[in-house]
Image (cartoon, helix red, strand yellow):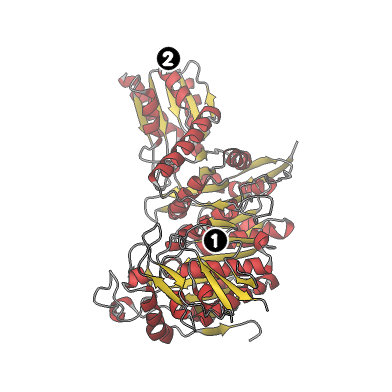
């Protein structure tokens, strides 16, 4: 069964602060330690497909780089 | 977008599509975003005029797609007073840090609040001067180490941290005072609610609103953004308790 | 023909501001200008302007910034120590290119000084005053009538050039009473598309700032300001000449001391000494070309700057005489009004020294 939600995080916009990672109740976000964006910063990404579309990560994101999608049916 | 999904949260329209200059994890961005969400949802962008301070948020007008004025250090309350008086049909907000609002601009803040100017103050309290490199602010906690209190803030020399929300809540002209934070998703949601409530109070023209946001400064505090959340929870909030301090009719 | 009244200088200035369509006034009491705040407070119910009795001159000038930035015709008034307090804000306003009017009904300094009339704020007025490279348009009324005329002119010039205009006068002109003719009120309609009045859908956001953090941007901003100041210098120099054509001694004097100096001209001519008066009406832009022209005339023997200071405007006179003729200065300070006789005595002494 597909997950309830998923997120898109703008790689260029993200500064890798990690506030989204700790705000996620299902621990599906991680910081990409093996890569950087063009600013030389690690960035956050959805590592596991178990997002519940609670929006916590997007609300605390200081750079407004997270879009949250929720399953319609 | 994947099939069978819909957008339930995205960057607010009025937050300009650009990369903000703030350090990673800084709550300035969070509060900018929440404020723009409120203006968008209330559909009052056209009727809002903002004032930004001197400090890290001096460039707030680069991010908020509303008419704005950049004030001299500490004088945002005076600038906002004139705008509000000359445009009584507009929502006027003053976005200021603690060095700006509570040190150099204390007089302007106090008198604007005492006059009950129809202004929404958004007071970012991170207990430090961020832009100039992490010096002691009037809100720096007792014992907190900064570049100008390298041995920790000593109340004998520097007094205790200034509680601006409690001070301004004593004025008849002030309608609504709430202290919030963005250290958790729940608290960030409360911050947004407080901003919305303040804007609605502004519409009623019943006095000043004052929203103090307990904020962070990972760069100035010399910690990671995630560590800054612990400092807020363990050190700042116990001294600056969150919650409504004053509201209309109470 | 307008309405004729017998008025105090400060009240005339206030009434003129109302008739100029002033929409906002922000002020703080200080002697000898408090009548302006008082007059405007008294008249407020009869008009549409906003009046805020500010908590300090610092607040007043920043309210002026806010009001001007929001597109309104606004004014503040003060006296010397208050004007010193305002300087940071004036610099911001000049850089942000906001039109507004400031009046300094000056008193004697330095320090807390005296509440008596003085012209010791000349440098502060014409050399910028605050930090950075900027100038204000500076008008120097010498009568109650000119308090009216210059106030209206200050609003017009401020709007024309998007720059703060300063009325620099003194406690004597502010406090004296004279007959004035008041003009009909102006129907002022602001046309300031750059102002922060709320971002409508048909335009980009407006923002008012004096921040240019990149060096290149700051320099470009300075070039823009200097181009504007050049245009003002070319178009807005105002002065008055009295018996100047055949004069051997050219007195340069402004404000209240120009009135005394005019008497000196007449007294000297009774003695057969040809004295003339050049009265700058705009202290900035200064009548540089007229002073240079007079300094090149064979008939001119020397210049005498008469001012109620230890010698401030005299420096600008010297700059434009460029050593072609001697330039002297006579002045009193502390609020002491000069008599025509003492000025004449000094002028005659210099004349006889050859």
The quadrant holding residue C272 is top left
* Whether residue B11 is situated above or below residue B210 in the rendered picture: above
**Could one spot residue C263 in this view of the protein?**
no
Q: Secondary structure at mark 1?
A: strand
- Residue B219, how many percent across, how many down? 34, 68
Residue at 54%, 58% (x, y): give it.
Answer: B17
Nearest the eye: B74 or B15? B15
- Residue B98, how many percent across, how many down? 43, 70
Nearest the eye: C19 or B154? B154
The chain letter for the residue carrying disc 2 is C
**Mark 2 lies on residue:** C297
The chain letter for the residue carrying disc 1 is B
Nearest the eye: C112 or C192? C192
Nearest the eye: C33 or C235? C235
Numbered badge on residue B51: 1
Numbered badge on residue B175: none
* Whether residue C255 is situated above or below residue B123 in the rendered picture: above
Tell me whether marks 1 and 2 sit on the same chain.
Answer: no
């Amino acid at each position: 069964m597909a997950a309830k939600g998923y997120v898109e995080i703008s790689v260029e916009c993200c500064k890798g602060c990690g506030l989204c990672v700790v705000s996620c109740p299902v621990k599906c976000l991680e910081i990409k330690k093996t890569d950087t964006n063009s600013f030389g910063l690690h960035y956050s990404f959805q590592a596991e497909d178990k997002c519940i579309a609670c929006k916590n990560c997007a609300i605390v994101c200081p750079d407004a780089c997270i879009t949250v999608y929720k399953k319609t049916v | 977008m994947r099939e069978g999904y819909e957008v339930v949260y995205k960057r607010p329209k009025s937050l300009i599509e650009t990369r903000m200059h703030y350090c990673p994890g800084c709550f300035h961005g969070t509060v900018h975003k929440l404020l723009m969400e409120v203006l968008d949802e209330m559909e009052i962008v056209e009727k809002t005029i903002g004032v930004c301070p001197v400090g890290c948020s001096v460039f707030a007008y680069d991010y908020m797609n509303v008419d704005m004025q950049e004030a001299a250090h500490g004088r945002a309350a005076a600038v906002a007073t004139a705008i509000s008086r000359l445009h009584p049909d507009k929502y006027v907000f003053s976005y200021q840090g603690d060095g700006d609002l509570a040190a150099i601009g204390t007089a302007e803040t106090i008198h604007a609040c005492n006059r009950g100017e129809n202004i929404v103050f958004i007071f970012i309290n991170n207990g430090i001067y961020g832009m100039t490199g992490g010096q002691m602010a009037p809100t720096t906690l007792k014992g907190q180490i900064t570049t100008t209190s390298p041995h920790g803030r000593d109340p004998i020399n520097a007094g205790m941290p200034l509680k601006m929300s409690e001070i301004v809540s004593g004025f008849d002209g002030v309608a609504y005072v709430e202290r919030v934070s963005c250290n958790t998703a729940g608290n960030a949601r409360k911050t947004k609610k407080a901003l919305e409530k303040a804007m609605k109070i502004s519409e009623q023209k019943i006095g000043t609103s004052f929203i103090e946001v307990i904020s962070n400064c990972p760069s100035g505090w010399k910690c990671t953004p995630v560590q800054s959340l612990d400092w807020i929870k363990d050190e700042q909030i116990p001294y600056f308790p969150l919650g409504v301090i004053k509201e209309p009719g109470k | 023909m307008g309405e004729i009244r017998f008025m105090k200088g400060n009240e005339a200035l206030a009434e003129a501001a109302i008739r100029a369509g002033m929409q906002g006034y922000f002020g703080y009491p200080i002697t000898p200008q408090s009548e302006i705040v008082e007059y405007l407070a008294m008249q407020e119910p009869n008009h549409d302007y906003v009046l805020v009795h500010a908590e300090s001159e610092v607040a007043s000038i920043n309210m002026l910034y806010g009001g001007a930035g929001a597109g309104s015709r606004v004014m503040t008034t003060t006296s010397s120590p208050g004007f010193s307090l305002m300087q940071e804000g004036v610099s911001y306003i000049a850089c942000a290119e906001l039109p507004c009017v400031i009046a300094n009904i000056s008193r004697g300094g330095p320090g807390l000084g005296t509440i008596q009339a003085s012209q010791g704020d000349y440098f502060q007025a014409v050399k910028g005053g605050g930090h950075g490279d900027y100038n204000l348009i500076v008008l120097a009324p010498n009568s109650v009538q000119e308090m009216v005329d210059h106030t209206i002119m200050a609003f017009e010039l401020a709007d024309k050039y998007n720059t703060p205009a300063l009325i620099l006068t003194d406690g004597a002109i502010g406090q004296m009473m004279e007959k004035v003719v008041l003009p009909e009120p102006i129907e002022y309609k602001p046309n300031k598309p750059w102002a922060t009045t709320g971002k409508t859908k048909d335009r980009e956001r407006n923002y008012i700032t004096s921040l240019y953090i990149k060096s290149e941007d700051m320099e470009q901003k300075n070039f823009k300001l200097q181009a504007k100041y050049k245009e003002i210098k070319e178009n807005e120099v105002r002065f008055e000449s009295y018996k100047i054509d055949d004069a051997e001694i050219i007195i340069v004097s402004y404000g209240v001391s120009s009135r005394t100096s005019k008497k000196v001209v007449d007294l000297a001519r009774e003695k057969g000494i040809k004295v003339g008066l050049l009265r700058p009406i705009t202290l900035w832009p200064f009548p540089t070309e007229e002073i240079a022209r007079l300094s090149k005339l064979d008939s001119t023997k020397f210049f005498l700057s008469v001012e109620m200071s230890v010698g401030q405007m005299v420096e600008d006179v010297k700059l434009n005489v460029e050593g072609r003729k001697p330039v002297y200065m006579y002045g009193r300070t502390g609020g002491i009004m000069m008599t025509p006789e003492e000025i004449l005595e000094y002028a005659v002494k210099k004349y006889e020294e050859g």
